[in-house]
Image (cartoon, rainbow, N blue to C red):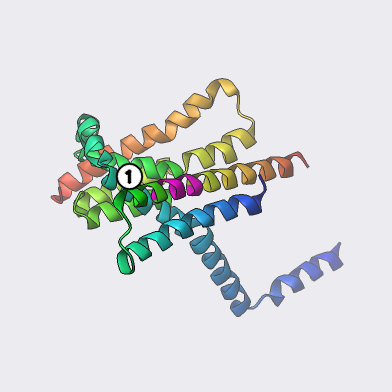
Amino acid sequence: MSKKNASKIQWTGCLIVVVSMLLSHYLIAIPETAMIVVASVSFVMMAAGMISLKIIAAKEEKAALRK
Amino acid sequence: MADNMKKSEQTEKKESIITLFMKGCYDGYNIGVKNILPAMILGYTLVYILQATGLMDLLGTVFAPVMGLFGLPGEAFAVLISAFFAKAAGAATGANMYATGILTMSQAAMMLPACMLMGTLIGHYARIVLVSGANQKWHWLLILTPLFDAALSLWIMKILFTVMGVM
């Protein structure tokens, strides 16, 4: 996975959870079960993106050290 | 050689205070937006999921004996879980739990050093342990050390707060 894709996944997760929470708070009543599913999916996306970014950074540092 | 030194001195002098200040602002913005903001959202999301699914109560019951050693409720374990992903996520979870009344102010404050010590465990494992090429035999010890430090910091904070009369 590239740095750009990992970042995209992370930010998509952030956007999904923030937008859905704002929607449920101000506009429409989203059922709690749906909110839990949305929050869980976005949590996984955020965690995956965050960990991928760290691993990519580690690989870059390792490559820089070898040079 | 002397010319090179003069040139490097000149380039060093060229950077004015305003340029340095702007550079610092840019770095601060980058850290805030790219690192801290997603981590904070992650922390808040984790607390929401735990509360909405009822897992928070389960955490409270299961980890009550362990966290009770440090004078904390079992629910405080969620702070350590989110700190596992990022330090800011741990801090955000602690703040959210204080806001919802699960933790008191002193309990949330005493968890902060633990978040800093064991925070971003996976990231640091990848960026330091794997990059340094440490002997694979000792990797488990290198992971356990921050966890031990975090537990120690909780003890120290508990003693400190008890002496101060906060807890």
The part of the image, by quadrant, that contains residue B85 is: top left
Q: Chain of mark 1?
A: B
Residue at the spot x=54%, y=36% of the render? B125
The one of B94 and B23 positioned closer to us in this rendering: B94
In the rendering, at what x and y percent does residue B134 appear? 61, 28
The one of A9 and A32 positioned closer to us in this rendering: A32
Q: Is residue B84 above or below residue A14?
A: above
B33 left or right, relative to A26: right
Segment colored magenta? A39-46
Say whether residue A43 is magenta: yes
Residue to which mark 1 is pinned:
B79
Q: Quadrant of the N terminus of chain A?
A: top right
In the rendering, at what x and y percent does residue B36 appear? 46, 57
The one of A50 and B120 positioned closer to us in this rendering: A50
Say whether residue A42 is magenta: yes
The part of the image, by quadrant, that contains residue A67 is: top right
Mark 1 belongs to which amino acid? Val
**Element class at badge 1:** helix
Residue at the spot x=30%, y=61% of the render? A29
Counting every numbered tag in the picture gives 1
The one of A52 and A20 positioned closer to us in this rendering: A20
Residue at the spot x=22%, y=55% of the render? B100
How packed mark 1 is, by other alpha carbons closer than 10 Å (few <14, some 14-19, many 20 or more), is many
In the rendering, at what x and y percent does residue B141 appear? 48, 26
B117 left or right, relative to B20: left
